[in-house]
Amino acid sequence: MRYLLAILSFLLALSVFSCEPKDEIFTSDPSAVLEFSGDTVLFDTVFVSRGSVTKRLKVYNRNKRAVRISEIALAGAGASAYQLTVNGVQSPLVNNVELRGGDSLYVLVKANINPSDDKLPFLVADSILFRTNGNAQHVKLVAYGQNAYFHRKESINTLTWKNDKPHVLLDTVLVQEGATLTIEKGTHIYGSNRSVLLVNGQLLVEGTPEERVVFSGYRREPEYLTAPGQWEGIRILTKSGSNNIRYADIKNTQYGLRIGNPGKAGTLVEGCAIQYAFLDGIVAFTSDVKIVNTLIHNCGQYGFGGLGGGNYEIIYSTIVSYKNPLLRETPLLAIADFIPGTEIKDKPTSFRLVNSIIFSDGFSADNEVLITPFAAAVNVSNNILRTQVYKDQLKDNGNKLNVAPKFKAPDKSDFKLDTLSPANGGAKVLSTVLSDIKGEVRSTTAPDIGAFERTKD
């Protein structure tokens, strides 16, 4: 009987061992290497002292049996500019990580770069070391760092933002009444979530065609380059006046420009590109605004809205929506003597639209122009417009209605004119506007409609 019990115990143990899944049996084979989702974890520009977003590296065990990763470590150890998090543990060194056969895990990586005196972007590199069964494998870490000026909850007097380093808006920045903020040509301003530039004084943006000022979202990854709503935008307040915004790119906002300064000297927007706004490109309330040589495209509501009366001029500009992922339910251009949803109505309104393109793709937006009352339109001439409502009122004065402008590559946000565009040579000569959004000289005899000049004398 004793021998029978021993045999039964042996058979039971053998049965248990034979039933253990292969993917839970650890292998010590040196050939059992790991695979990774990439050989490099790359961080785009990291603004120094702010840290980066967290990137994920996926580690695969393609083997049938489990492996024990004896070490996951930063080569730079505690002095590294990077942080690792493995299985919830944040440390430059993690030991004995078990990974079943056919399974995977995430290694979370974050870059934190210390300030320096460098004004130009610089490279910060390191690597992650993985040791498994005596094998060493590496994944490179690369980040481009850059020092910056950081602005958080500031109320500023007269000053100049220089172009030697980027400016990062972390929260609200207010230009006080009576003060002037001057932004030098070539300056880059990055807005983080919920940041906004409020102007109750004067804003002077001094970009040039060669050295544009750029306002954009804080995130630098490629998938965020055209993403709207990353920061609030620029808001012109009631006490502000005599604002000049020249040759600036304003993008990734809730709204590009929101202007509400009744009775104050106007705002000039010249040579600008306003794009990828979640709401409006430019919206003004009972204000005076002049737009020249400006491109506004792919916004979620109005490209330009002048509401509650005011004086508005749009000259040599292109306001369009092509392949827009936002579900826009408003016209590209709206001029009205009232403000929807308020008691403000019947305000004096004046509107001039010359040498401009207001157009969209698709078949669902036949009316991209709203002017009410229509008597406010003191001068609408030499434009390309998409409209059914005003096709009788606007059919003369050099206007071309419901004719596709034929841009060079609108699917790629390239709104320069194609060789067969009806905009070629269709504008009237304006002695006050001699060049286009890129600084190209306009024809003195037959200039082109829109922000971009193609015709040469």
Image: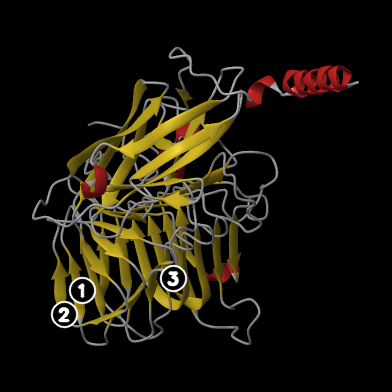
Q: Residues within 10 Å of mark 3 (few under 14, many from 20)?
A: many
The x, y position of residue 108, in whole percent, is 44, 44
Q: Quadrant of the N terminus?
A: top right
Q: Disc 2 marks which residue?
A: 158
- Report whether 291 appears left or right of 351: left
- Residue shown at the point (54%, 60%) measured from the top left: 302
Amino acid of disc 1: Leu
The x, y position of residue 67, in whole percent, is 52, 25
- Residue shown at the point (67%, 50%) measured from the top left: 388
Q: Kindly indicate the quadrant of the structure image that contains residue 360.
A: top right
Residue at the farthest top position = 31
| Element at label 1 | strand
| Element at label 3 | strand
Q: Quadrant of the C terminus?
A: top left
| Element at label 2 | loop
Q: Disc 1 marks which residue?
A: 181
Between 418 and 27, the one nearer to me in the picture = 27
- Report whether 89 appears left or right of 27: left
